[in-house]
Image (tube, helix red, strand yellow):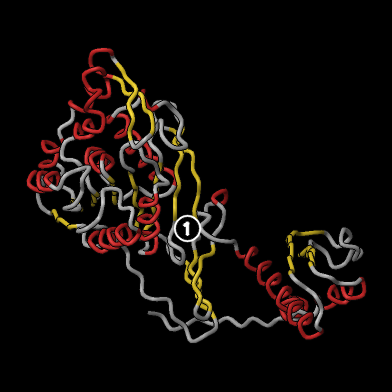
Amino acid sequence: MKSLRLRIPNRNGLTLSAVLEFPPTSPPLAYAMFAHCFTCGKNLRAERNISLALTQEGFAVLRFDFAGLGESEGEFFDTNFSTNVNDIVDCAAYLAREYEAPQMLVGHSLGGAGVLVAAAQLDSVKAIATIGAPADPTHVTHLFAAMEKRIMEDGEASVSIGGRPFRIKRQFLEDLKRTSITELLPSLRKALLITHSPQDRVVGIDNARDLYIAAKHPKSYLSLDGADHLLMDKEDSLYVANMIAAWSVRYLHLIEKPPLLTDKQAVIRTGAKGYTTEIVAGRHSFLADEPRSVGGDDLGPTPYDLLLASLGACTGMTLRMYADRKGWDLREVRVHLEHSKEYPADAGLGEEPKGKLDHIERVLELEGELDESQRKRLLQIADRCPVHRTLHSTIIISTTLSPSR
């Protein structure tokens, strides 16, 4: 699975830390975003598990830290529920600008309330899934109820949430009270999946009931029976992700492609948009692409990267076979490769032929108890690997068109 670490600017001039994860063997069917729970972060185990499961189902998933939390800039005491919603909208705008607008939002706990509010501002979003979400954002105040009066009287106070200290300002409480999720839901008009555990001791199951009653169809409810609020059991988080993916297909604009099949050794498919290319070689699937600097999405190695990888892999395997047959103590082979174009004179070939030549630089690192004669012999054997010989031989490539479909 390809993963990109991103720095996304929000409207307040702060940089949000984010991770964008892609499906391992195909271009994304759609982009989704994940909003974490109150005072949590994008790296919470449940968030990582859900993101992983969604990528396995074909989604690209962006998860990020709200301002003031995790690796994002800002101070928590300067944020509130409204700034969280703005962060969701700003990250969605970044996705739309740099990749593709998100079609689905997933939110955990207060992040679930946040995606419900943010979705009303995002036309691209067709489906929303909440996990243990409160029906009223003020629900989070029960985590520091003993300090609420002091916060209102003094303007701020330090509270302990999950064993960690946080400064809470009065504006945070006042902002929570200005937002009514149940009043917003009837006009949302987007597909909604509410997932909640009947045993949730942090956000009670009655919140799921209130959300479901307030929402208009299409709406669905999924019981996470036996799960805790943070989905600490891996099986629970993977289950909810798989169910979200299955449910969402009904509401998202997904372009399902037929399986990539061939009776040859390999088959490659490049679509109508961009350079992302699917590759099936035997029983193995992966992607090739071009860097974003030349119009690609950088979801896989370039064709020349694959060429170098082929030569390097063949070199390592050939040396492994030879050393094993000789009984030599070759413990590890590392092959470093670089491709460039050079004029013949620069390569020591004189002035002919005209034009630049392809030059591959290959550097071998050999680990083990090897004497100098053994190392020199392995250097010679490297030139005998099958891919090396193929690159030096006359190659015939015959190309035909298959019948039109």
Mark count: 1
Q: Is residue 210 left or right of residue 69?
A: left
Question: Looking at the image, which residue is at 34% across and 37% down?
Answer: 162
Kindly indicate the quadrant of the structure image that contains residue 400: bottom right
Furthest residue in direction top, as rendered: 154
Q: Is residue 152 above or below residue 352?
A: above
Q: Is residue 180 above or below residue 122?
A: above
Few, some or many C-alpha atoms within 10 Å of disc 1 (few <14, some 14-19, many ≥20)?
few
Q: Is residue 359 visible?
A: no
Q: Is residue 127 above or below residue 188?
A: below
The quarter in which the C terminus is drawn is bottom left
Question: Looking at the image, which residue is at 45% across and 34% down?
Answer: 72
Q: Position of residue 236 (x, y in %)?
A: 29, 59
Question: Looking at the image, which residue is at 37% across and 35% down?
Answer: 163
Q: Nearer the viewer, residue 135 or 311?
A: 135
Q: Is residue 264 left or right of residue 232?
A: right
Q: Nearer the viewer, residue 270 or 40?
A: 40
Furthest residue in direction left, as rendered: 213
Q: Position of residue 82 (x, y in %)?
A: 27, 29
Kindly indicate the quadrant of the structure image that contains residue 147: top left
Kindly indicate the quadrant of the structure image that contains residue 121: top left
Q: Position of residue 164 (x, y in %)?
A: 38, 33
Q: Nearer the viewer, residue 273 or 308?
A: 308
Amino acid marked by disc 1: Gly
Question: What residue is shown with label 1?
Answer: 274
Q: Secondary structure at mark 1?
A: loop
Question: Looking at the image, which residue is at 54% across and 60% down?
Answer: 300
Q: Is residue 173 visible?
A: yes
Q: Position of residue 99 (x, y in %)?
A: 43, 49
